[in-house]
Image (spheres, helix red, strand yellow):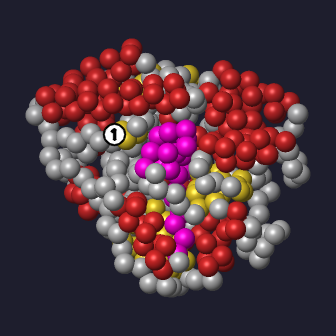
Amino acid sequence: MTGESNEALFRRAQRVIPGGVNSPVRSFRSVGGAPYFVARAEGARVWDVEGREYIDYVQSYGASILGHAHPKVVEAVRAAAAGGTTFGAPTANEVLLAEALCERVPGLELVRLVSSGTEAAMSAIRLARGATGRDTVVKFAGCYHGHSDALLAEGGSGVANQGLAGSAGVTAGAVADTVVAPYNVVPELDRDVAVVVVEPVAANMGLVPPAPGFLEGLRAECDRVGALLLFDEVITGFRIARGGAVEVFGVRPDLWCFGKVIGGGLPVGAFGGRREVMEHLAPLGPVYQAGTLSGNPLATAAGLAVLAELDAGAFEALTATAARLAAGLTDAIAGAGLPVQVPSVRSLVGLFLTADPVSDYDGAKAAAGTGLYARLFHALLERGVALAPGAYEAAFPSLAHGPTELDRTLDAAARAAAAVAAG
């Protein structure tokens, strides 16, 4: 440790890292101020370099579903590292993790491991185009599928938090075959569409559940024109249920993307789907995809350790925690006289400081535009509760968030909301 303050480290970081951060979502640009630098973490808590303790609802944007530094994950990584960190050759754990994913998700038959959610989505889109012989991709405004060129338009998450609609450096040609539709509205497709990609629960524009019939409508419309349906479950996969969105909503896509939870806090991603689609991938088929660190032994060991802990009781506990958090935040913030909507879907929680329910990206932007989120964010941070530094992110309670953490959070939320209301 350097012994420096958050401010001092941020000044150093800005001299050698663009904006001082290695991912824009970590910056405090949309809320103001300098980010805190984490020194260590355990369970539901993180400590910054100045020794301040926070109850953490970022949890690496959902990756740490057991909480930080879970002993079984730490031991799995330690044991794997002792045998080597990367080989460029297959390992048994790659097979075990792929089997674990396929066993849990109905309809998932083959899986390819990669190193990030962005890589998973990019590869799944290429596969869908190669398998169908079509070019057009349909995505939904406010859904984020990583930072590959074709998928950045109206991307939500860090893109929206930076005040951007897309990204400089993305050519017109790169997005020429991308169609953006409003979330929760089933678009009419034509036979040029290769794939419709969607977050089954939108968690990158705050948290927006799918409207009744939306996912079912997408499945029917894809079937009508012969397009593939891709569920981006980088966030929802193995977080909202053991079998992900298929288990919760009963709609089965052709392709999936996964990440976060399946790596236990280490860099990992995966895409998979029906056998006849996945067999278009090299070395079986003509769609090329590769990665030097794909199926990394540390990441697969951590992922297997996490999945082993996620039984039915774990998901019941996560859902109960999220429900209590959502209800308590609603009462605390509304009790101070602030407008608020706190949606929850299983273990995911959103926060919109608006009087109007949010069902799409336009509603999420309107809520973010009030400026109240930044004020409440800092008021909570001062009282020891860390949310994501952007109004377009979800909150991620973990299995380490127990009654003590919730009591402290809700007390802090009531005091923070009162301070914001008082100006």
Position of residue 301 measured from the top left corner of the image (x, y, whole percent) = 75, 35
Q: Which residue is at the far top?
A: 404
| Stretch of the chain drawn in magenta | 227-249
Residue 389: name its quadrant.
top left
- Amino acid carrying mark 1 in the image: Ser
**Residue designated by label 1:** 344
Q: Residue at x 52, y 66 (%)?
A: 229
Position of residue 28 measured from the top left corner of the image (x, y, whole percent) = 40, 45
Q: How many neighbours does mark 1 have within 10 angstroms: few (below 14), some (14-19), or many (20 or more)?
A: many
Res 204 visible: no
Q: Residue at x 52, y 75 (%)?
A: 227
Question: Residue 247: within the magenta?
Answer: yes
Considering the image in quadrants, where does the N terminus appear? top right
Quick check: 148 above or below 304?
A: below
Question: Residue 403: within the magenta?
Answer: no
Nearer to us in this view, 81 or 110: 110
Res 173 visible: yes
Q: Is residue 356 left or right of residue 360?
A: left
Position of residue 375 measured from the top left corner of the image (x, y, whole percent) = 25, 39
Q: Residue at x 67, y 48 (%)?
A: 102
Q: How many marks?
A: 1
Q: Is residue 281 left or right of residue 135?
A: right
| Secondary structure of residue under mark 1 | strand
Position of residue 51 measured from the top left corner of the image (x, y, whole percent) = 49, 20
Considering the image in quadrants, where does the C terminus appear? top left
Q: Residue at x 36, y 74 (%)?
A: 187
